[in-house]
Image: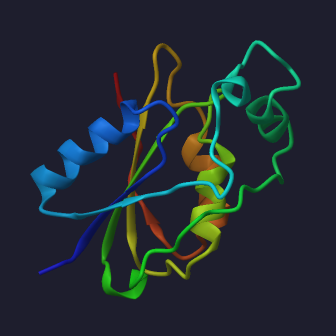
Amino acid sequence: MSKKLVAYFSASGVTKKAAEKLAKEQGADLFEIRPVQPYIDADLNWNNSQSRSSVEMKDSSSRVEIAARVPDMAGYDEIFLGFPIWWGVAPHIINSFLEDYDLTGKTITPFATSGGSGYGRSNEELKPSAPGAVWNPGKMIR
């Protein structure tokens, strides 16, 4: 029997609710991907080109330091990966998370939340951060 993990980043709480529901439905463990420096409202102002999130998303190589690691990532076979859509893709903290582990052979099933944006090129942007992983198509949760 495979061991499942729902790992998620939630800036406003919307993705957290979806992740908690999915973890319960799947009988999966739950892990919140949190930045060392939490985002405040001003950081998330997408109308301000100088806000933290705007600056991060303009630079595809930017990475966000994560506050904690999954204690036993090697023990999981399947990872459901949740995030909000920022600027048409996953936030770069998701790349940071993926790059912290060897996910070779693990199945990753992404899911995203958004108030109006589509899923965009999220998988294409994330795949290089987890070489060797098996990727399922992403799912949009509205």
The quarter of the picture where residue 75 lies is bottom left
Residue drawn at point x = 30 percent, y = 45 percent? 19
Compared with 70, 125 (above or below) is above
Quadrant of the image for the N terminus? Answer: bottom left
Hey, which quadrant is residue 108 in on the image?
Answer: bottom left
**Which residue is at the front of the view, 90 or 122?**
90
In the foreground, 61 or 121: 61
Q: Residue at x 68, y 48 (%)?
A: 92
Q: Say how many tags the image has.
A: 0
Judging depth in this view, the residue of 104 and 94 nearest the camera is 94
Q: Residue at x 64, y 70 (%)?
A: 99
Q: Indicate the position of residue 121 as horizontal and vertical percent values.
A: 61, 37
Residue 34 vs 130, above or below: the answer is above
Residue at 82% over, 52% down: 62
Q: Position of residue 64 (x, y in %)?
A: 72, 55
In the shown orientation, is residue 118 left or right of residue 4? right
- Is residue 6 toward the left or the right of residue 40 in the image? left
Image-based side of 105 in relation to 44, left or right: left
Residue 94 place in picture, x, y as percent: 58, 54
Does 39 appear above or below 71? above
Decide: is 47 above or below 86: above
